[in-house]
Amino acid sequence: MASAKQQENMLLTEHFTWPPISLIDDIINAINEVLYRCTDSFETGLLAADPALLGWADRYASEGKTAERDEDGNEVYPEARLEIEEGVLKLETLMENAVDKNFDRLEIWTLRNVLCLPRGEEELVKWVRLGHYENIQSPSKDSNLTPETLFTLRRKLAETQKLNAALVAEKKRNEAQIARLRALLQPSVAPKREPRNSTSPTKPTNGPAEAEAPFAFLTHTPAAQALGLHPLSNPPSTTTASTESRTPLTTHTTFTTTQLPHLRHLLASLKPHLGTTALPSSSKASKNAEEVARERKVYLESQSKRVLERRGVDTRDGVEGVWDGRRPGGEEVRGLEGLVGGLARGEDGSGGGEGEGEGEAMDTS
């Protein structure tokens, strides 16, 4: 069982909605933060000051030392920075001890005299009723309420809370999904701008609104309105009780869905005829492929010849080969063909001897 002090702390915590000790802790933390800012500023000021003004020149003169000089000729005291840092650290420690000592007294005094109940009335905690406990009827004692039954009720309550949280999250997700789907059909209305010249014709532009709502044409185009498809933001007005509650788009979608079984039946009836239907033979397909290849080759040759003729190349006697950096002419090619033919006749001829054949070969060359 909790002691009287613990019961008092729980009562004050429930009344203030925060523990009484947390107020004192916040005050001490704020004072320490101010203390650290003061010491940081103090250290920065001392480090920025001239060491000679802080007494380092007199100290070096009394000790008979000579100060070093930097590139600009100013006196440098290496020990000054180290001593300043040590002195500031000692000052900070001294101030922390003073803060802890005095604010510990403040904590004790506040918890004993301010954030507490009247002294000498320890039984008062049992009789204090807070405002949020008013008009609450305590349940009657149930003899059948066992610890096991209470545990089961708590489990049911926990599961119910989990289910409630899951349903709320699902509702938010559904609302977000519906909003995204509506954005696909409902374009954002851009503010209208007055044209500078009223006589100039307006040009239709494909703005970002069409990109944001790619399916807006289903309900916002003149053709859709002619079919009776109304936008989601402007539903058709029901003037009579016999007006159908569903929109035309829903009606068309429902009709299309009802026709799917009939389309499946037609497809099943066509499948037996696919095996007996004459398909194009492989020989005919190969002939068509050869014809296409021949036509492509003729086309490529004609286009290549046209390009070479534009560049000044004579293509009447062929364009293959290059001789001494230039293309051979028709007469040179015919001379070479005659030379090769004469050599072939000299080697294969049977009317003369070897010497005659060699003489003909030599005369020809």
Image: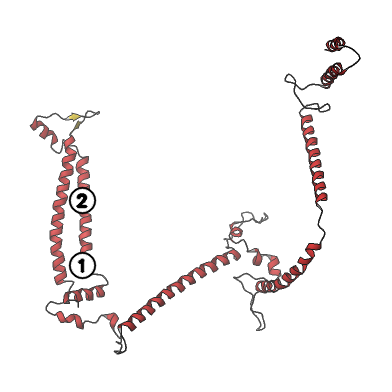
Q: Are marks 1 and 2 in contact (CB under 8 Å)?
A: no
Q: Amino acid at mark 2?
A: Cys
Q: Quadrant of the C terminus?
A: top right
Q: Quadrant of the N terminus?
A: bottom left
Report helix, strand or loop for mark 1: helix
In the rendered image of this protein, does residue 295 appear above or below residue 242? above
* Earlier-in-chain disc, 1 versus 2: 1
**The label number, if any, that marks residue 38 in the structure image:** 2
Q: Amino acid at mark 1?
A: Ile
Residue occupied by mark 1: 21
Count residues near mark 2 (Cα–Cα under 10 Å), then give few for <14, some for 14-19, many for 20+: few
Front residue of this view, candidates 359 and 134: 359
**Residue 36 place in picture, x, y as percent:** 21, 52
Of badges 1 and 2, the one in the foreground is: 1
Q: Indicate the colouring scheme.
A: secondary structure
Q: Is residue 16 left or right of residue 350?
A: left
Q: Is residue 289 left or right of residue 91?
A: right
Front residue of this view, candidates 271 and 231: 271
Count residues near mark 1 (Cα–Cα under 10 Å), then give few for <14, some for 14-19, many for 20+: some
In the rendered image of this protein, does residue 20 appear above or below residue 36? below
Instruction: Using the numbered discs, state the Cα–Cα distance from disc 1 to disc 2 in whole angstroms.
Output: 26 Å
**Residue 251 place in picture, x, y as percent:** 67, 74
Residue at horizontal 18 percent and vertical 29 percent from the top: 68
